[in-house]
Image (cartoon, rainbow, N blue to C red):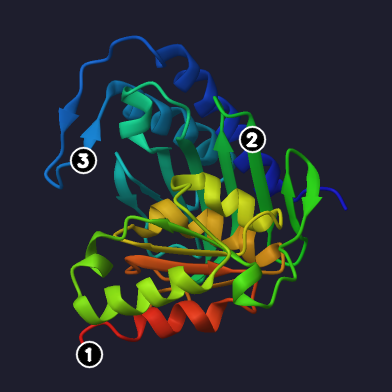
Amino acid sequence: MSASPFLRTAIEAARAGEVVIKHYYQSNLRIEIKADRTPVTVADVETEQAIRGVLAGAFPEHGFYGEETGQERADAEYVWLVDPIDGTKSFVREYPFFSTQIALMHRGEFVLGVSNAPLFGELAHAERGHGAFLNDKPVHVSNIAVLDQATLSLGNTKTLAGDPACWGELAKLIRSVSRIRGYGDFYHYHLLASGKIDLVIESDVGILDVAALGVIVQEAGGTVTDLDGRPLGLASTGIIASNGPMHPHALAVTAARGA
């Protein structure tokens, strides 16, 4: 099945952003620190501008929510969510674990996702009801259903570590799985969607970081919720993504928060 105009445009926008990213990568950029103590560079801003230009050119009536340039027409039927360089710390320290994240929300539901890691050589995409793809090849989550055969990847667990009960439950989960990793950022979601790992738990993230990745994992046959088991939304600050059978084990960990 051919890609929709939405998906074709999102991929075109990601590729436009890639040109900017490759231009600035390893160029000793000046770094500024935002109010939330995260770094930003001219590459972040110009990448978002390039992406926004492609999306607005194709769909001028759509809303936009960008990491660097903010929101416009947030009440539109369709709203694009963009993090131009998710993993700016990796970008400025010159290792390739960063990506461009582009998601499309339709009446409050995430329906499309593009995750492009240009220096890593991976572009994943998915559209609701049409499956998930990595470098244009269809992907699917694993069917592992037993904990002692599963691989768990953790990211940004600072908040979870600060809750003794939750941290204790997480320790139990870690002892139960076959392998524990911390791939982080886009990469563990690409691995999950491809059936190479089985469960991701990540706190302290924003929706711009994970909206596109959530669509990709779901379209690969996986399960995606926030830390309370609810669908991802604009206010989500954590994510559990799994192959499905592993999901209840992660929810048991996060349910211990504040206990």
Residue 122: assigned label: 2
Q: Mark 1 Cα within 10 Å, few/some/many (few <14, many 20+)?
A: few
**Picture quarter containing residue 135?**
top right
Three-letter amino acid code of the residue under disc 3? Thr
SS at badge 2: strand
**In this figure, which residue is indicated by the disc labeled 1?**
259
| C-alpha span from label 2 to label 3 | 25 Å
Outermost residue toward the right in this view: 1
185 vs 9, left or right, is left
**As drawn, which residue projects farthest toward the left?**
35
Residue 228 lies, in percent from the top left, at: 38, 82
Compared to residue 92, the image places residue 163 above or below, namely below
Question: Which of the 4 image quarters holds residue 189?
Answer: bottom right
Q: Which residue lies at the image location 54% right of the left edge and 24% below the top edge? A: 119
Residue located at (24% from left, 82% from top): 165
| Residue wearing tag 3 | 38
| Badge 1 amino acid | Ala
Percent coordinates x, y for residue 216 in the rendering: 63, 57
Q: Is residue 223 left or right of residue 32?
A: right
Q: Earlier in the sequence, mark 3 or mark 1?
A: 3
Q: Nearer the viewer, residue 78 or 151?
A: 151
| 71 or 210: nearer the viewer | 210
Q: CA distance from mark 1 to mark 2?
A: 40 Å
- Residue 80 shows in the view: yes
User: Three-letter amino acid code at disc 2?
Assistant: Glu
Work out how far the residue at label 3 is from the one at label 1, CA to CA, in angstroms: 30 Å
